[in-house]
Image: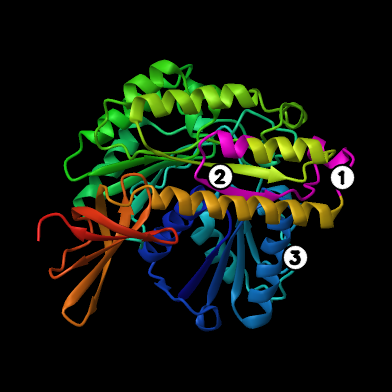
Amino acid sequence: MKVYFYTLGCRVNQYETDAVRELFIKAGYEIVSDPGSADVCVVNTCTVTGEADRKSRQQLRKMARLNPDAVICAMGCSSEMSEGMIDADVVCGTRDKHLLTEKIDTFLRSGIKREHKAELKDKTSMNELADFGTVISPEMSRAYIKVEDGCNSFCSYCIIPFARGRVVSRKEEDILSEVKAIADSGIREVCITGIHVCSYGKDRGEDIMSLYSLIHKIGQIEGIKRISLGSMEPKSVTPEFISALKTEEKLLKHFHLSLQSGSDTVLKRMNRHYTADEYCEVAKALREAFGPFSLTTDVICGFPEETEEEFAETMEFVKRAGLNKIHVFPYSVRKGTRAASMPQVPADIIKERAKKLISLSDELEKEFAKSFEGTCVEVMVEKSERTDDMFSLKGYTNEYVYAQVLSDKDHPAGTIIRANVIRAEGTTLITTPVDP
């Protein structure tokens, strides 16, 4: 049996796809990259926006059309929120993905004709968290480590707390066991991720220092050279947490601090529990602790009732906050959220605002790369390409800037090279090794 995977959405979804892929391999399946040759096609869906929901259904229809004889499977957030997934034979929600191979076996044994009719998913228990054990990504340069699932925030635009439930954390010993196995496999960088990473341990009555304790213990594992953190919430990042993080030498100098808007009035309508000034205070504290570092964020443009003045506040805020990259999300209505019933901004205005934000982000990213010219950086090799007598070693710096090291020697993935930055070409650093 051959299986094909298609993933939409966040890093957690990618982690869970990798986890389910491992389950299929253990069950004797062959992983293929062509959906047309597969016996089973799995789409890991996303429902974070109305657009993501639409793309999830579109991909299921495409798989059913492209390969009408395959078993079409939908799993993940969009599946959880839908009463039935048309074009899917087998459906899993957010916390029963570990049962997918069993559900496919049951479907095949049933002898039901593959007509891709909607199948109601099993209702999962939202206070349970399936642990997949060790998950090793096919992307051998780094591994994502899921430490928790769910969110308690209930932002007015977000459906995720309904799709994934409230915060549930993995056991520390299970996480550390997974990281040890990952290090033994040769992977040198891990990214700690989750739906709301800063809430790790909250369901057990713990505070954010539990997350720091976990980071510290991961840093002690032999073979791990780098640790990065997933998206953090400004209100959760305390001075004590920042002070502790500063002591971790393996932690990358890159933080993704979620913003969503630089306007206080929009933040209030979003039910985000911080102000623009409070965001800046956290960014300032991180800068004082880590010196030059990479600060990236998410911004939703065209949120319901967003005026030109409020959008202008966001544009100005992005410039003064020291951000160097923005992930721009044009607002789209998500049925079931409070924001869906608010007065909507016209689509053409949302599109125009997104263009302006993306353009600003491109400028900031290029300026940030240029600021490294003439400095020395550390680059972890992810891949190597040979051109004539030279090797082009590609990877990311400690500040998570993409870099190319021009060297007369090859180096395997996972090697950290100290390199001098000759110049920035767009957002890429062109470098040469400090030691020939």
Dot 1 corresponds to which residue?
A: 344
Q: Which residues are magenta?
A: 317-345
- Count of residue discs: 3
The residue sitting at the left extreme is: 436
Quarter of the image where one finds residue 251: top left
Residue 169 location, x and y as percent?
Answer: 46, 31
| Figure quadrant of the N terminus | bottom left
Q: Is residue 408 left or right of residue 264?
A: left
Residues at circles 1 and 2 in contact by the CB criterion of under 8 Å: no
Answer above or below: position of 269 versus 319.
above
- Left or right: residue 435 compared with residue 313: left
Instruction: Give the labeled residue for mark 3.
Output: 86
Residue type, numbered disc 2: Arg
Query: Contact, CB < 8 Å: mark 1 with mark 3?
Result: no
Mark nearer the viewer, 1 or 2: 1
Residue at 65%, 69% (x, y): give it: 59
Q: Secondary structure at mark 2?
A: loop
